[in-house]
Image: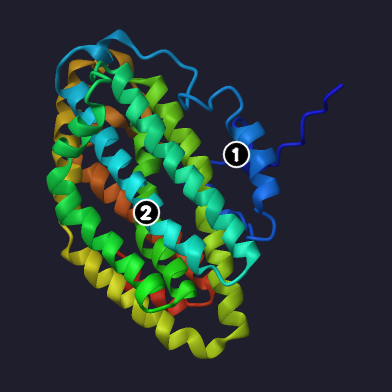
């Protein structure tokens, strides 16, 4: 008789916290999240029954009908698929540059996670009626401007730190603080937005968020442990965070997010009967939000995460560098 492994809370589909709570409250290390952990807790836990598609919910018929709601999700999934594929490219350099087996194993699992995310985003596009033949070309063409203006600069920055500057810890900080730390709240918002409008999309976002909790917390632990052993590294770390923040300020991310949020707004009202009094967070009905309010909400969640994760890493002074909204 085969005994299934005991799945830890953070990898359990039903018991894992949401991304914001998990990233702020949980502590995981690379030693804990090794290859064996991934093969048991993730492959046999989080992904059990959802390995192929990332969900087991039905795609509603209205999501297959042409219109602003479907168009918003097609844009979101396409661009997120491109971002995840680019993360695979970047993180492959982390695997090569890892200083030890522990770090190498963890980033190998993260490469697989990001590749899986790209795959399930693509597959849901097919669920929405995008032809499977020529799918990669469709995604590339749709997201050409996003790739050139947002993804390329981010990838070049992170890759340059690990490959050209030879700074593995700095590269981990860049990915954890500047890239995933800033993008994670938008992923959380995606899950909440689509819960009633497209349960399959919400489940896909839920599974990806469970992985992101691990990526953010382990990345934070790697930086924290290195800084504790090497306090003289602090000025270099702060310099990289400042460089990352300057880069982020130069990117037209808001433009691309608001484009699909405007489409979502139109589609949301067209299907208002599905939402009713549904709250995107306690006390705030989704139907009462605007595209800019939702964008600002994700930015405030970024600030909330930074206020917890950066002091944990040992750089509380970096909170004001990352913060989007002054207190």
Q: Is residue 193 above or below residue 115?
A: above
Residue closest to the eye, 60 or 168? 168
Q: Name the image quarter holding the C terminus.
A: bottom left
Q: Nearer the viewer, mark 1 or mark 2?
A: 2
Q: Residues within 10 Å of mark 2 (few under 14, many from 20)?
A: some
Residue 325 visible: no
Residue in the picture at 65% in, 50% down: 35
In the image, 33 versus 322, the foreground residue is: 33
Query: Looking at the image, is 286 positioned above or below residue 20?
Result: above
Most foreground residue, 238 or 51: 51
Residue 232 image position (x, y, % from top left): 51, 91
Q: Which residue is mark 2?
A: 89
Mark 1, residue position: 16
Q: Earlier in the sequence, mark 1 or mark 2?
A: 1
In the image, residue 61 sits, relative to residue 30, either above or below, namely: above
> What residue is shown at x 32% (from left), y 30% (from top)?
285
Q: Is residue 301 left or right of residue 97?
A: left
- Residue 143 location in percent, x, y? 18, 41
Left or right: where 304 falls relative to 36? left
Can you see residue 274?
yes
Q: Is residue 33 left or right of residue 326?
A: right
Crowding near pointer 1: few (<14 within 10 Å), some, many (20+)?
Answer: some
Q: CA distance from mark 1 to mark 2?
A: 28 Å
The one nearer the camera, 269 or 239, is 239
Label count reads 2
Image color mode: rainbow
Disc on res. 150 = none
């Amino acid at each position: 008789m085969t005994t299934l492994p005991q799945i830890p809370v953070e990898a359990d589909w039903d018991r894992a916290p949401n991304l914001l709570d998990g990233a702020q409250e949980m502590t995981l290390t690379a030693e804990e999240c090794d290859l064996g952990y991934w093969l048991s807790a993730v492959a046999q836990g989080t992904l059990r029954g959802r390995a192929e598609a990332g969900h087991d919910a039905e795609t509603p018929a209205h999501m297959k009908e042409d219109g602003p709601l479907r168009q918003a999700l097609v844009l979101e999934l396409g661009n997120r698929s491109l971002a995840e594929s680019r993360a695979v490219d970047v993180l492959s350099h982390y695997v090569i540059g890892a200083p030890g087996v522990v770090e190498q194993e963890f980033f190998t699992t993260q490469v697989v996670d990001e590749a899986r995310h790209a795959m399930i985003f693509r597959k849901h596009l097919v669920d929405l009626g995008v032809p499977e033949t020529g799918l990669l070309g469709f995604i590339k063409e749709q997201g050409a401007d996003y790739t050139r203006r947002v993804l390329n600069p981010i990838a070049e920055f992170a890759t340059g730190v690990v490959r050209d500057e030879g700074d593995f810890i700095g590269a981990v900080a860049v990915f954890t603080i500047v890239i995933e730390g800033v993008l994670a709240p938008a992923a959380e918002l995606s899950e909440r937005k689509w819960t009633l409008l497209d349960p399959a999309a919400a489940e896909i976002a839920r599974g990806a968020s469970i992985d992101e909790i691990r990526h953010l917390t382990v990345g934070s632990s790697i930086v924290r442990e290195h800084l504790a052993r090497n306090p003289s590294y602090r000025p270099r770390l702060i310099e990289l965070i400042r460089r990352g923040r300057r880069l982020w300020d130069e990117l037209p991310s808001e433009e691309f997010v608001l484009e699909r949020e405007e489409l979502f707004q139109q589609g949301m009202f067209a299907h208002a009967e599905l939402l009713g009094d549904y709250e995107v967070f306690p006390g705030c009905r989704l139907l009462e939000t605007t595209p800019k309010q939702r964008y600002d909400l994700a930015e405030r969640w970024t600030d909330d995460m930074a206020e917890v994760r950066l002091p944990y890493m040992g750089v509380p002074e970096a909170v004001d560098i990352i913060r989007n909204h002054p207190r």
